[in-house]
Image (spheres, rainbow, N blue to C red):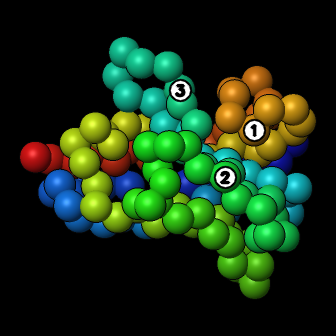
């Protein structure tokens, strides 16, 4: 099973930016970022096929977040700009298995999560 290691979380003021990184133990078909705020369900943020040609975003991420990959480093990034307090959550990288890209059961491996906190 693929192992995923995330990094890059932190505390930032509203309007600021952060870049999250996810390094898989092998080259997957596709990866996604999800997030989970306290008391809420885990929700889809963005998806990328590892050839980099296909990306999808949740409405909340469109125009502010960019998912990308660096093949040479085998790393997937989530660049987050114009952050808002409602973006505060634990962010998880996930390995895509099959079916709908925006639901948790379609993913079979998860990273440990990184905390992103946006202050107002």
Q: Can you tell which of label 2 and label 3 is closer to the viewer? A: 2
The percent coordinates of residue 114 (x first, y second) are 44, 46
Kind of element beneath mark 3: loop
Q: Residues within 10 Å of mark 2 (few under 14, many from 20)?
A: some
Asked if labels 2 and 1 touch by Cβ distance under 8 angstroms, the answer is: yes
| Of callouts 2 and 3, the N-terminal one | 3
Tell me how far mark 2 sits from mark 3, CA to CA.
17 Å
Residue with the mark numbered 1: 101
- Would residue 5 be found to the left or right of residue 28 on screen? left
Residue 96, picture quadrant: top right
Q: Quadrant of the N terminus?
A: top right
Where disc 1 sits, the SS reads loop
Question: Tag 3: Cα neighbours inside 10 Å, few (<14), some, or many (≥20)?
Answer: some
Residue 108 in view (yes/no): yes
Marks 1 and 2, the one that precedes in the sequence: 2
Which residue position is annotated with label 3? Answer: 42
Q: Residues within 10 Å of mark 1 (few under 14, many from 20)?
A: some
Precedes in sequence: disc 3 or disc 1:
3
Residue at x-position 82% and y-position 48%: 2
* Residue position marked by numbered label 2 in the rendering: 56
Position of 94 with respect to 34 (left or right) is right
Does 18 appear above or below 35? below
> Compared with residue 85, is residue 40 higher up or lower down, i.e. above or below?
above
């Amino acid at each position: 099973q693929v192992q995923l290691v995330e990094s890059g979380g932190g505390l930032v003021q509203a309007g600021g930016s952060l870049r999250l990184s996810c390094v898989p133990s092998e080259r997957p078909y596709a990866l996604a970022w999800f997030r989970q705020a306290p008391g809420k369900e885990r929700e889809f943020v963005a998806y990328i096929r590892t050839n980099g040609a296909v990306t999808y975003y949740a409405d909340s991420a469109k125009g502010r977040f960019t998912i990308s990959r660096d093949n040479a480093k085998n790393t997937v990034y989530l660049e987050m700009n114009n952050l808002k307090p409602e973006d505060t959550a634990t962010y998880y990288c996930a390995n895509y298995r099959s079916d709908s890209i925006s639901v948790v059961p379609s993913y079979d491996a998860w990273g440990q999560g990184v905390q992103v906190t946006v202050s107002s």
